[in-house]
Amino acid sequence: MSTNPRTRRTASSTEGAPEAAGEGGAPPPGVRAIKKYPNRRLYDTQTSSYITLADVKDMVMAVEHFIVLDAKTGEDLTRSILLQIILEEETGGVPMFSTQALAQIIRFYGHTMQGVMGNYLEKNIQSFIDMQARLTENAVVKLPNPVQSFMTSYMEQSSQIFTQMQEQMAKQAETLIGAIQPIPPKK
């Protein structure tokens, strides 16, 4: 999250780049503004009505661009609201993450590899979405065994992303090791 109050991130399922807020903290054109009040209620400025987390989830599923702002401070709360939706989904039905996977993710916070891991997960999820889209296309064309083709392609892309992550880790390690030069003994 940005420390500049004029820079805001918007939730979008199709684009990775954050969009900057306009002058005065207003969201950019085409971005739906949701205000969160201290009583935890969410107000949709587009429909002039209060909404629920389920409504926000529906916006995510519909690939609508939106931003959630604190009604008092204008602080961007979008990530917090998205995390609440994930928490509800994880506790409500069949969880996507195992306890072990969640523990591993937590261990990366504050670790030097936190940024690399976040980047790796994001690229891997995007790769999976791309493969899913291809699988859907292939199902329409009725190719033989599209699931096997999908998994093969996904594994190849995942392997490429993992290789890139390893290269980034090696570069970071070289940088860290280069910064830790032994101090010659005093004479």
Image (spheres, grey):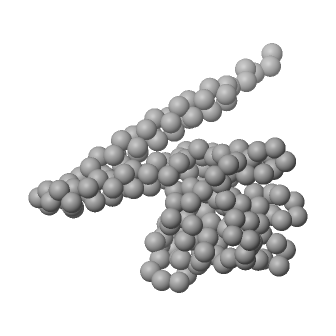
Q: Residue at x 74, y 66 (%)?
A: 45
Displayed quadrant of residue 102: bottom right
On the question of residue 165 being in view, the answer is yes
Locate the C terminus and report the quarter of the image it occupies.
top right
Q: Residue at x 84, y 74 (%)?
A: 38
Q: Is residue 84 above or below residue 109?
A: below
Q: Is residue 64 above or below residue 173?
A: below
Q: Is residue 114 above or below residue 57?
A: above
Q: Name the outermost residue toward the top.
A: 187
Displayed quadrant of residue 84: bottom right
Count numbered badges in the picture. 0
Relative horizontal placement of residue 172, taking residue 161 as reference (left or right)? right
Q: Residue at x 69, y 65 (%)?
A: 46
Q: Position of residue 27 (x, y in %)?
A: 73, 52
Q: Position of residue 103 (x, y in %)?
A: 56, 67
Q: Position of residue 112 (x, y in %)?
A: 63, 45
Q: Name the outermost residue toward the front.
A: 47
Relative horizontal placement of residue 168, taking residue 8 as reference (left or right)? left
* Nearer-the-camera pick, 47 or 91: 47
Q: Name the outermost residue toward the left.
A: 144
On the question of residue 103 being in view, the answer is no
Q: Position of residue 179 (x, y in %)?
A: 67, 28
Q: Name the outermost residue toward the bottom.
A: 92
Relative horizontal placement of residue 182, taking residue 87 as reference (left or right)? right
Q: Residue at x 72, y 75 (%)?
A: 49
